[in-house]
């Protein structure tokens, strides 16, 4: 017998909450932070295939080191961010949340 077909990514992508930008408040999901911009861009592309829109933000630390952070959101609340995190976890991606004030 043939192995079962994997679940279509489109079904999971449809469950991803939309990010909001109107209120200026909410929760950001950070999926990675890299020294190399190419690594951040690779993760961003992987997230796009999962249906999770993201962006790369460049941050320079106090010591002068530069990091490329991969972030999604902001989402309206912790529940919406948790849905995105659950999708990421099912696909082997760790993440953390950051409240936006």
Image (cartoon, rainbow, N blue to C red):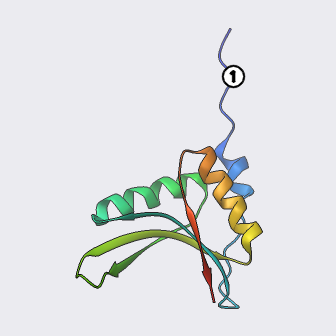
Pick the residue in front: 8 or 99: 99
Residue 24 drawn at (x, y percent): 65, 91
Q: Is residue 46 left or right of residue 62?
A: right
Residue 34 drawn at (x, y percent): 34, 64
Q: Residue furthest top?
A: 1
Pick the residue in front: 11 or 87: 87
Q: Residue at x 65, y 85 (%)?
A: 21
In what element is the residue under mark 1?
loop
User: Crowdedness of circle 1 by 10 Å Cα count: few (<14), some, many (20+)?
Assistant: few
Q: Quadrant of residue 44?
A: bottom left
Q: Is residue 87 left or right of residue 62?
A: right
Vertical placement of residue 80 versus 43, above or below: below
Q: Residue at x 30, y 61 (%)?
A: 38
Q: Residue at x 54, y 52 (%)?
A: 49
Q: Quadrant of the N terminus?
A: top right
Q: Residue furthest left?
A: 64
Q: Residue furthest front?
A: 63
Q: Residue at x 73, y 71 (%)?
A: 78
Q: Quadrant of residue 20?
A: bottom right
Label tally: 1
Vertical placement of residue 59 versus 56, above or below: below
Pick the residue in front: 35 or 8: 35
Residue 100 drawn at (x, y percent): 61, 84
Q: Quadrant of residue 27?
A: bottom right
Residue 35 drawn at (x, y percent): 28, 66
Q: Quadrant of the C terminus?
A: bottom right
Residue at the spot of label 1: 4
């Amino acid at each position: 017998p043939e192995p079962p077909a994997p679940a279509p990514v489109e079904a999971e992508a449809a469950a991803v909450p939309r990010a909001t930008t109107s209120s200026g408040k909410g929760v950001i999901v950070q999926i990675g932070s890299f020294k190399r911009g190419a690594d951040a861009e690779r993760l961003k592309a992987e997230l796009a295939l999962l249906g999770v829109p993201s962006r790369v933000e460049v941050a320079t630390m106090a010591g002068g080191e530069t990091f490329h952070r991969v972030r999604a959101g902001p989402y309206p609340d912790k529940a919406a961010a948790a849905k995105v995190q659950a999708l990421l976890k099912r696909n082997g991606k760790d993440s953390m949340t950051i409240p936006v004030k």
